[in-house]
Amino acid sequence: MDVPCVRVPRERGETARRALADADLIADEFEITVDDGALYIPVTDPDAVSALDLEEAADGDVEIVTREVDERETQTTPADLLGFDPSYERLGDVVLLDEDDGERALEIAEAVVDSDLPVETVLNKASKVKGETRIRDWEVVAGGDEGGDGSGGDQPPATETVHREYGCEFCLDLAEVYFSPRLATERHRVARQVEAGERAFDMFAGVGPFVIPFARRGAECVGVDVNERAIEYLRENARRNGVEGRVTAIAADVREVAPKYEGWADRIVMNLPHSADEFLESAATLAGDDCVVHYYDIQHEDDPFGPGERAIRAAAEPEYDVTVETRRRVRSYAPHELNVCLDVRLER
Ligand code: SAM
């Protein structure tokens, strides 16, 4: 079968394989092959591989090619057992489903558990994300206290897991905090812009998927979230990733914190699509003389960037010169609606 593969000289193969495994990009269902002094590593997402600093990690000479490779015979996938390819996301040892039909969810969950995937729990979405903290309800379909809410008595709840993303570890409980594995590539795109010594402020930090990789690159970080549990996990994740000395985690409404950090930030992350515009005054308070803001928004596909750009200009001008450096479509959110990011430089 033709599969996208990373081709790397054999002697640098292990370094490249480790970097790809850390980013969860290896297509495990296919064999890694050696041919004519090169290693071919099958990958799940060639675009995400391009965003990874693999050239640097493997010391150059890395290419993405399409190649015929064998399937690994030892792996039984959920699709093998079901006879169709179910749609799901992986978060640590948890599989996430989005199925309206409970019986179909159960059928997929049983196949996931019986397959060779290293999975402990299967959860099905039981509501949309809700309210200020953007948490949703989950039904435990397999593993944990099946059919329950995941609270699990004395055991860690079935909804808690440790997820790895681009070499960082995140412990989190989906019943108590917001987290989406789908944004990994986007977060990595932003993290690659961060330089050692800069001051980064995440206004809606969650469990730290921006803050932790920023701090690992040497930034001094402040993460704020109104959800106290998210801030507890952010502190734990800072310790797990060895960056607690560069992370300040604050449980509060960011509008109350902003005046204490007036003019502090070289970089600001605003990942609260739908209502980030209500926090732009606080962002302008936080911004230093030269500051990049990563502003996430959800808008109609006809004009996905206009409303955000106008709102930023209204909040920051004339005190700052406003330059939009990147307009990026992150993913489709709903029919005709896009989740987008504006990277905007504010210069005083
Ligand atoms: N940045 C994280 C991520 O990418 O996973 C979390 C993003 S989540 C969409 C938005 C977060 O903003 C939630 O964790 C929520 O609790 C937090 N939040 C909402 N209103 C807030 C406020 N006024 N001040 C601080 N945090 C807030």
Image: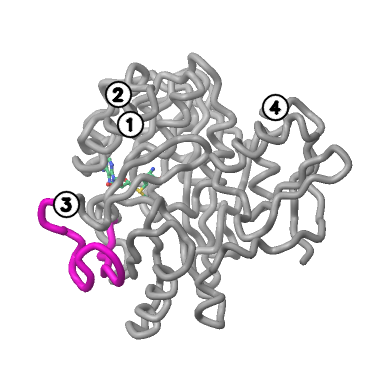
Residue 17 in the image: state x and y as whole percent. Answer: 64, 39
Residue appearing at x 27%, y 56% in the figure: 159
Residue appearing at x 62%, y 46% in the figure: 327
Tell which circle, 1 or 2, labels the residue nearer the N-terminal end.
1
Q: Which residues are magenta?
A: 135-155
Crowd tier of the residue under label 1, counting other residues whose Cα lies within 10 Å: few below 14, some 14–19, many 20 or above: many
Tell which circle, 1 or 3, labels the residue nearer the N-terminal end.
3
Quadrant that contains the N terminus: bottom right
Q: Which residue is mark 1?
A: 223
C-alpha distance separating marks 1 and 4 = 29 Å
- Which mark is drawn over residue 248? 2
| Residue that lies at the very extreme toward the top in this rendered image | 197
- Foreground residue among 306 and 238: 238
Tell which circle, 4 or 3, labels the residue nearer the N-terminal end.
4
Q: Which residue is mark 4?
A: 56
Left or right of 313, for residue 253: left
C-alpha distance separating marks 4 and 3 = 42 Å
Callout 1 amino acid: Gly
Q: Which residue is mark 3?
A: 155
Residue 272 in the image: state x and y as whole percent. Answer: 38, 48
Question: Which type of secondary structure does the marked residue at label 3 adopt?
Answer: loop
Colour pattern of the rendering: one colour
Tags 1 and 4 touching, CB below 8 Å:
no
Tags 1 and 2 touching, CB below 8 Å:
yes
Residue 61 in the image: state x and y as whole percent. Answer: 81, 32
